[in-house]
Image: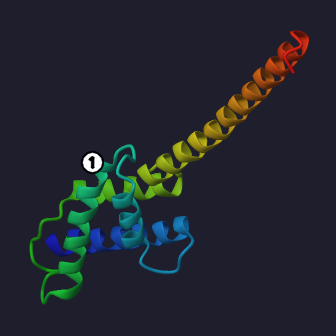
Amino acid sequence: MSNKTNLSFFNAYIQLDKTCADRLGIKQNGLSTYMNKLVDMRFAPGRSEVLPKLIKYRNCRNKIAHEMNAMSDAGDVTKSDIKWIRKFTKSVANRTDPVSRYERKAVRYSIWRKIRAGFIGAAIAVVGVGIYYLLDFLQII
């Protein structure tokens, strides 16, 4: 059973890696690149729940891939881990994962800052013109 579970885990991990690579527009190291982005995005929603699991799963994957007889050994991987990886793969593909959610918020924030700066600039211009006309009316200038 552990061999089957480890093989299912390994295949789910490979699918997640490919999905992350596709999502990020790269050819390889998709999950590592995704994790690096997640580390850099300190305020990404869900980061504190996802990142530790991804680190754990990367370590399990490396053990299975690089250690002798690791595929047949009973490991740290359970069926619920495989289920989580598959669910997370879907969230990356659907762009509901922490990195995608953070990027959407960053775009909205950037747009809002530009709009706010435009309003502030317009308000300053209106006040400036108003002061000019007031000073002109009072014949100060």
Residue for point 19% across, 72% down: 60
- According to the picture, the residue beneath numbered tag 1 turns out to be 49
47 left or right, relative to 104: left
Q: Position of residue 18 (x, y in %)?
A: 46, 72
Q: Position of residue 45 (x, y in %)?
A: 39, 43
Among the 4 quarters of the image, the one containing residue 39 = bottom left
Residue that extends furthest to the left in the rendered view of this protein: 74
Q: Is residue 136 positioned above or below 91 on the image?
A: above
Please count the marks in the image.
1
Residue for point 26% across, 75% down: 7
Residue that extends furthest to the front in the rendered view of this protein: 140
Among the 4 quarters of the image, the one containing residue 66 = bottom left
Q: Position of residue 56 (x, y in %)?
A: 20, 64
| Near-viewer residue (99 or 119) | 119
Amino acid tagged 1: Glu
Residue that extends furthest to the top in the rendered view of this protein: 138
Residue for point 73% across, 25% down: 123
126 left or right, relative to 51: right
Instruction: Specify the color scheme.
Output: rainbow
| Near-viewer residue (72 or 100) | 100
Q: Is residue 50 positioned above or below 141 on the image?
A: below
- Bin the neighbour count of mark 1 within 10 Å (Cα to Cα): few under 14, some 14-19, many 20 and up: few
Q: Please state, as top left, top right, bottom left or bottom right, where the N terminus lies in the image.
A: bottom left
Q: Position of residue 79 (x, y in %)?
A: 22, 58
Q: Is residue 70 positioned above or below 55 on the image?
A: below
Residue for point 45% across, 54% down: 99
| Near-viewer residue (69 or 104) | 104
Find numbered disc 1 in the image and state the secondary structure of the residue it sits on: helix
